[in-house]
Image (spheres, grey):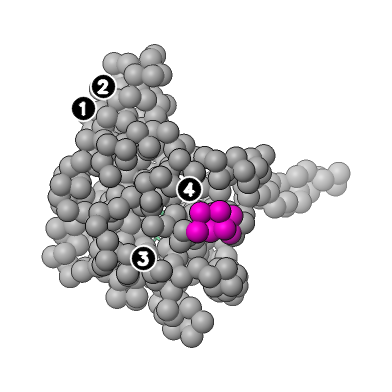
Amino acid sequence: MKISEILSNSKQFVSLEVVPPQRTMTRAELLDNIRPLMEFKPPYINVTNHRDEYIYVPQADGSYSRRLQRRSVSQTAVCASIMDEFKVEVVPHIICAGASREQLFYELSDFRYLGVENIMALRGDCLLGEKRFTPEPGGYSYASQLVADIRKEAATKDLCIGVGAYPEKHFEAPNLETDIARLKEKVEAGADYIITQMFFDNSLFYKFVELAREAGIEVPIIPGLKPITSYRQLTLLPEAFSINIPLELSSELEAHKDDKAACYEIGREWALMQTKDLLSHGVPAVHFYTMGKSDNIIGVIKECF
Ligand code: FAD
């Protein structure tokens, strides 16, 4: 079933995202980690994708040889396992970074083969150490180009497509208004719905939705949340995702920085408060970034769905 149909049929629901695990994790361990979340009947599970990393190995002659390093299980294998075990829709993230147009369409063809009807179309990020995003030769510079091409091809044009958005603006965008104009281009290219980056201040999300609607974006917008689980995330999350942590939350975590259990509980309480408030504002779903941890999220959704 397409996410667009689920969005138009359903009452408010839980939307989940999992990250392909390290190769040391078994299939059973991955599925056992997801299993407790299935009790809340998520209609689909997003599966992220991460561009290949390369290491440079010194050679005897002083040169370096480039070697591909894949630490995680492939996204395709994870999608197939989840579909097989839980009979639920999966939404693979297709990222432009590090891939040519042909490679991306072969990926899409593999997902069609598995019976996948939904994807998220994303640009992806720079390689570590790179200053600016550089597309692969024959690849895409922006997610909107991928969306447009998916809609043009007979084999892919029926896919339901989600795209990403940033209530605090994408870090490369000069301002939120311009970023929203770019988001509109993705929707005009054929995106069916939007999932946002995580945020910790709901007022930013409501303002973002207002601006998006004023700009003429009419598709559903699903807020993305991540409960903070440790004091370290106070610096890690802003660094990795270019987002802000409100003073009230950061000072609470600072005050309990040496107490792991307290920090975990503060993060859970904050996410719970955000989720309740978003649901009361009529969002279609709340998307949780699990990042390999399900206990904290279960704690939140148990009280809200
Ligand atoms: P785009 O929509 O292409 O935008 C990128 C930047 O370019 C923005 O600043 C935009 O304003 C600007 N822009 C767009 N079009 C134009 C144009 N025509 N001219 C000039 N500027 C333009 N990353 C992963 O690697 N794997 C994942 O699985 C993954 N999942 C994600 C899930 C969600 C819900 C979100 C929100 C993000 C996810 N990301 C993932 C991160 C994402 O890949 C990065 O944030 C990336 O930097 C931007 O991707 P995008 O698709 O939003 O890019």
Q: Earlier in the sequence, mark 2 or mark 4?
A: 4
Q: What residue is rendered at 26% in x and 67% in y?
A: 8
* Residues at marks 2 and 4, CA–CA distance in whole angstroms: 28 Å
- The range drawn in magenta is 79-87
Quarter of the image with the N terminus is: bottom left
| Residue 22 visible in the displayed image | no
> For mark 1, what is the residue?
248
Residue 202 placement (x, y as % from top left)? 20, 43
Reading the image, the residue beneath label 3 is 3
Examine the rendering and report whether any part of residue 209 can be seen.
Answer: yes
Q: Are marks 4 and 3 in contact (CB under 8 Å)?
A: no
Q: Secondary structure at mark 3?
A: helix
> Which amino acid, mark 2?
Glu
In the displayed structure image, the side of residue 177 where residue 114 appears, left or right: right
Task: Tell me the amino acid under the disc marked 3.
Answer: Ile
Residues marked 4 and 1 touching at CB (< 8 Å): no
> In percent of the image, x 42 and y 79: which residue is there?
158
Q: Are marks 1 and 2 in contact (CB under 8 Å)?
A: yes
Graded by Cα atoms within 10 Å as few (under 14), some (14 to 19) or many (20 or more), the crowding at tag 2 reads: some
Marks 4 and 1 sit apart, C-alpha to C-alpha, by 29 Å
